Amino acid sequence: MKYILLSGGSGKRLWPLSNDTRSKQFLKVLRNDEGQLESMVERVWRQLKNADIDQSAYVATGKVQREILQSQLGEQVPLIIEPERRDTFPAIALAAVYLYSVESVSLEECVAILPVDPYVEDPFFEHIKKLEDVLRESKADLALMGVKPTFPSEKYGYIVPEPSTDSSEPFMRVASFQEKPTQSKAAELIAQSALWNCGIFAFKLDFLITLLIKKGLPIQYEELARQYGKMDKISFDYEVVEKTKNIAMLSYDGVWKDLGTWNTLTEEMSTPIIGTGIMTEASHNTHLVNELNIPVTVLDVPDVVVAASPDGILVASKESTPKIKDIIKSIEQPPMYEERVWGKYRILDCVLGENGHKALTRRLCILAGKHHSYQVHRTHDEVLTVLSGTGEMILDERLQPIQAGDVIRIPAGTRHSLRALTDLELIEIQNGTGAFEENTVELCTTWTEIVRLCI
């Protein structure tokens, strides 16, 4: 069986730690068995390895999340890149076509679609393996996995099973679905043995490829990618699951949580304080996450979340945190913090002048052994000041060492790349016009290629 992990999200519900490039699955607020901080996606990939299925797994994601995924999971993890964000049906269709036309996976192969950010224990992934048997034994078009509810939640969808006629079967037939009901309706559904829909779908590859053919969509990856922007923004639940009649379901009664709100996330944090901060004893059931280089103090304030990052500061009662997504709709700013495959950066300042002139100041950390691509900025100059560490730089085909205290000027049109020998900390000031990222041209990406061009 092949496993596709869907990694997306707009990064609104856990603002200000999350943003358009660093959505909730990338926040390092959980602890692993060694006591080290890890993100949800790192935890899930570790669990895939424990279940010995990581070699059959892919991550489907958008272009903006490519580098943070490679930064956290490594550059060898296979990615299926969406040209743009289009919801779960287009994402799953693109992944299926990739398996079929690029990886030459058999149409008889089973494919399981998984969210990238569930909070579960290792047995959950052993249970997922059973979906292949469910598809074969039930002869269903789709197999789902439902979780036994612990309370009547309004946040989850519900799967209602048909009354069982054969208790010896390890699966149930699906009668209907209910998406995010009221609390009273949820209680009624639970009385009918409904399960929470945990967002896992399994099917034979032939099922989805045949569906795409019927819809007149390409089944070659490159062509579907070219037409991707024309596909409807619609979920897999609405476009496929609700229209499919022959569906089986596997029940799971272990630990399962969606850590999509501050309430659920803080329940799984092993410490009330992450980062620099002080909290008094009277601040019970309060959590502080501070990513800034200044201390935050919480005095006698119970039942709140305090989160500080380069993107903003949140102080909210835990009861009110589900409102965040709607409240911050009016905030328009690019991500102030990003992780890249070479390290990370934080925007310190941005000044907009006359005639479209802009000055942008960033603090960068380039990890030892990592490097930028060989690139040219068409519309802006850069000045780099090395704060700490050592490295080497190629500037218009000349290789030179750099170290703390060096100041490097890079005029627009200058080909350059930077490689860290030890962790490098730098201040970068960009001056120019236009969209800096869009006006940067990558010439090549591997250090071997870069050096070869400069010989």
Image (cartoon, grey):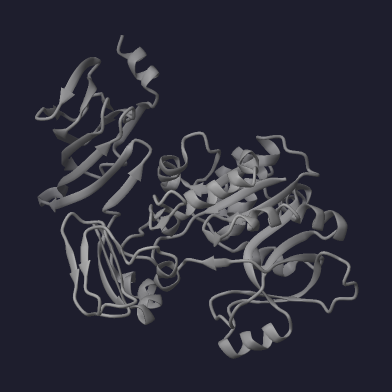
Residue 214 position, x and y percent, is 76, 54
Whole-percent x and y of residue 265?
A: 43, 67
Q: Within the image, what quadrant is residue 421 found in?
A: top left
Does any portion of residue 84 appear in the rendered image? no
Relative height, residue 284 to residue 310 (above, below)? below
Indicate left or right for 290 with 144 as reference: left
Image point (15%, 29%), residue name: 411
Is 341 in front, or is 286?
286
Residue 344 occupies quadrant: top left
Left or right, 190 with reference to 170: left
**Along the horizontal axis of the image, is 389 left or right of 57?**
left
Q: Quadrant of the image for the N terminus? A: top right
Residue 117: x %, y % from top left: 51, 58
Q: Which residue occupies the foreground of this view, 292 or 18?
A: 292
* Front residue of 64 and 414: 64
**Residue 152 x/y as whole percent:** 59, 83
Tag count: 0
Residue 79 visible in the current orientation: yes
In percent of the image, x 55 and y 38: which residue is there? Answer: 78
**Residue shown at the point (39%, 56%) measured from the top left:** 27
Question: Among all residues in the image, which is located at the extreme bottom?
Answer: 184
* Image quadrant containing the C terminus: top left
Position of residue 160 relative to residue 375, above or below, is below
Q: On the picture, is 409 further left or further right than 237? A: left
